[in-house]
Image (cartoon, rainbow, N blue to C red):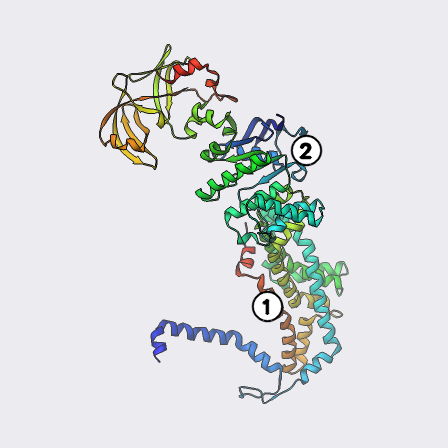
């Protein structure tokens, strides 16, 4: 009791509030985890009556579900790759070159995130119908790319800006051509920012549901799309299993990238200079 | 002596109006020349133009007989040490130094030897495996210097390399730089706004102001015979008074000095504090009252109130006891410089008073 007395009332209240917040935040996730491994779980039991992996074998055996997993990861990888190729040079241009309407163009990248996604996608769908891009692999890639543009340009641009000009100049002085300078000096120094952006791009592509639903049906179903039908047609445990599978890459990647993902890496990227 | 670097009529004007106009300079082999001036005077512009980082509007730059105007920095025989952010933080000291050698496709063993030699030169033996973040500011600049030396440049360019360091370190590195320069017989172009630094290390100083050259001369001459009012007030400490020129004399109160340059009417007279001396009984002297005495180490600065304003006087510390507050004394000047009111006439070359004969100097020194 003396412990709480010494802390003072304020601290105890803070602690209680934090506990409630954590419960609110992690509660559903914890519930999900338990659900994925449960056999029989009836309200009002706090824990499942029995554990089982039967829904895991069901999910992993179903062909269309496994296919959707491959498709999701494949698309995410391709989208990240293409996004890198398109956006890194643009990011470098924004960082180093002071061209007319620079801020306007930088700001324009916000537009893809400024509108309700569905409205944007419907307009795109109309165009896709015209160009026969509906229900095609390329169509899905394009839709995913649109979402990645802002992140992949802003964050690396800030990373490039953090590379001081005199460091590039001293490399040129030492005898390196501009391309060599970019490869040996600028890019390695901007690596953390680029990795952060790539990780977020990959994850957001895995997560992309609405656009893919619109464009990909009926042939191309990624994991989020399949999720809709699983939740509708099967008991909640199956959905929980699938949820865990979907969330796992996010957790793994974020942990792996923690070395590079500092709070300032992301925050720095979101400034408009 | 051959000319290492020849700059002719270099011009670069920025949209803001700053820059240089028609800058010309020849640097001999093995010479250390400093560009000195306040911020915005154009010294960095000149340096960066020589290095190839700025494209000038006009003029030519010839290094060792070859015109380099059209060459990018990587092809020029010059090396630059920047003020900060010199080293690449993601590479070890060894890789920082070896970068240029690897580009030249040198053999590994040879590279290791050269890096060792360079680190030896800047007194950082054994630091190969360290990262720049593990080094102090002074050590980082030393490595930057070593890296520039490894390029074996015809001209070494230094852009205020010691400005970001504390005073003691600056003195130390200054001396080391001078030693290295003398040992390797390097031609160096140094830029700084610190006039003490310029006076200490240069063979010649180019004093610049607002894109123009005020004076090019040895440190001695710049200090003793400043060519313009700007140089006089920029270098060292200086007292300024108004005098009156008439005929072949300049009058300051009861003091008279020879009117060497035949000025007329009102002139500005400049006197160094160490040239303000006590007038003996028989001489003419100005009345002055001692306002305060500031002890500055081996010498003291005395503030004097005269009819011409406040004058500063330097005295040796042994004389401090002779100078008491509110005491009235009589002073005179050992030597003076004079400038007319339209002294924005820049002498792009040597000081006017440079070519005095020995007799004239003796007369000029004291009346």
- Percent position of residue B55, x then y: 62, 34
Q: Is residue A247 above or below residue A112?
A: below
Residue situated in front as seen by the camera: B364 or B316: B316
Q: Give the quarter of the image for residue A153.
A: bottom right
Disc 1/disc 2 C-alpha distance (Å):
50 Å
> Circle 2 sits on which residue?
B70
Q: Is B301 positioned to the left or the right of B222 in the image?
A: left
Examine the rendering and report whether any part of residue B14 can be seen.
no
Give me the chain letter of mark 2. Answer: B
| Residue count near mark 1 (Cα–Cα under 10 Å), binned few <14, some 14–19, many ≥20 | few
Residue at mark 1: A255
- Quadrant for residue A220, please give it: bottom right
Q: Which residue: 59% across, 55% down?
A: A155
Which chain is disc 1 placed on?
Answer: A
Q: Assign the N terminus of chain B to one quadrant of the image.
A: top right
Query: Which numbered disc covers residue B353?
Result: none
Q: Name the one closer to the observer, B25 or B134.
A: B134
Mark 2: give few (<14), some (14-19) or many (20+) Cα within 10 Å. Answer: few
In the rendered image, residue B190, in percent from the top left (x then y), is placed at: 54, 35
The residue that appears at 72% across and 58% down in the rendered structure is A127
User: Does B297 sit above or below residue B132?
Assistant: above
């Amino acid at each position: 009791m003396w412990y709480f007395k010494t802390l003072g009332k304020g601290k105890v209240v803070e602690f209680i509030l934090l506990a409630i917040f954590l419960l609110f935040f992690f509660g559903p996730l914890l519930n999900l985890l338990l659900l994925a491994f449960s056999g029989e779980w009836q309200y009002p039991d706090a824990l499942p009556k029995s554990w089982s992996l039967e829904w895991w074998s069901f999910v992993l055996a179903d062909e269309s579900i496994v296919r959707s997993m491959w498709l999701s990861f494949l698309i995410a990888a391709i989208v990240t790759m293409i996004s890198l190729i398109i956006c890194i040079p643009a990011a470098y241009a924004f960082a180093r070159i002071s061209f007319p309407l620079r801020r306007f163009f930088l700001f324009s990248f916000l537009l893809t995130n400024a509108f309700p996604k569905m409205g944007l996608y419907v307009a795109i769908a109309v165009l896709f119908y015209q160009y026969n891009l509906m229900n095609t692999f390329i169509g899905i890639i394009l839709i995913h790319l649109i979402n990645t543009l802002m992140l992949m340009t802003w964050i690396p641009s800030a990373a490039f800006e953090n590379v001081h000009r005199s460091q590039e100049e001293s490399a040129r002085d030492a005898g390196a051509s501009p391309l060599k300078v970019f490869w040996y000096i600028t890019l390695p120094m901007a690596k953390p920012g680029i990795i952060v952006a790539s990780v977020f791009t990959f994850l957001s592509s895995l997560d992309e549901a609405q656009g893919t639903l619109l464009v990909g049906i009926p042939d191309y179903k990624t994991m989020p799309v399949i999720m809709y039908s699983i939740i509708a047609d099967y008991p909640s445990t199956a959905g929980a299993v699938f949820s865990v599978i979907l969330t796992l890459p996010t957790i793994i990647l974020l942990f792996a990238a923690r070395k590079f993902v500092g709070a300032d890496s992301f925050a720095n990227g979101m400034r408009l200079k | 002596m051959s000319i290492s670097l020849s700059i002719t009529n270099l011009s670069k004007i920025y949209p803001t109006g700053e820059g240089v106009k028609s800058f010309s300079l020849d640097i001999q082999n093995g010479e250390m020349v400093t560009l000195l001036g306040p911020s915005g005077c154009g010294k960095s512009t000149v340096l960066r133009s020589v290095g190839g980082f700025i494209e000038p509007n006009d003029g030519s730059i010839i290094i060792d007989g070859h015109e380099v105007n059209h060459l990018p920095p990587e092809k020029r025989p010059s090396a630059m040490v920047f003020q900060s952010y010199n080293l690449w933080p993601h590479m070890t000291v060894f890789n920082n130094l070896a970068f240029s050698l690897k580009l030249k496709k040198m053999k590994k063993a040879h590279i290791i030897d050269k890096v060792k030699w360079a680190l030896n030169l800047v007194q950082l033996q054994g630091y190969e495996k360290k990262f720049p973040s593990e080094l102090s500011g002074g050590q980082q600049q030393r490595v930057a210097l070593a890296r520039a030396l490894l390029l074996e440049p015809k001209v070494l360019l230094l852009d205020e390399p010691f400005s970001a360091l504390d005073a003691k370190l600056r003195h130390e590195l200054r001396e080391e730089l001078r030693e290295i320069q003398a040992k390797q017989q390097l031609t160096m172009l140094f830029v700084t706004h610190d006039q003490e630094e310029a006076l200490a290390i240069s063979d010649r100083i180019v004093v610049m102001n607002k894109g123009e050259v005020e004076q090019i001369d040895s440190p001695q001459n710049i200090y003793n015979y400043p060519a313009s009012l700007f140089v006089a007030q920029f270098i060292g400490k200086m007292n300024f008074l108004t005098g009156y020129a008439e005929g072949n004399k300049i009058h300051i109160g009861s003091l008279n000095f020879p009117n060497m340059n035949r000025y007329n009417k009102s002139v500005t007279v400049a006197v160094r504090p160490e040239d303000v001396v006590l007038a003996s009984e028989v001489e003419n002297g100005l009345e002055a009252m001692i306002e305060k005495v500031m002890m500055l180490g081996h010498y003291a600065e005395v503030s004097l109130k005269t009819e011409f304003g406040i004058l500063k006087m330097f005295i040796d510390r042994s004389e401090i006891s002779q100078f008491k507050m509110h005491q009235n004394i009589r002073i005179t000047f050992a030597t003076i410089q004079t400038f007319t009111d339209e002294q924005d006439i820049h002498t792009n070359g040597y000081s006017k008073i440079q070519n005095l004969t020995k007799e004239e100097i003796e007369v000029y020194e004291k009346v």
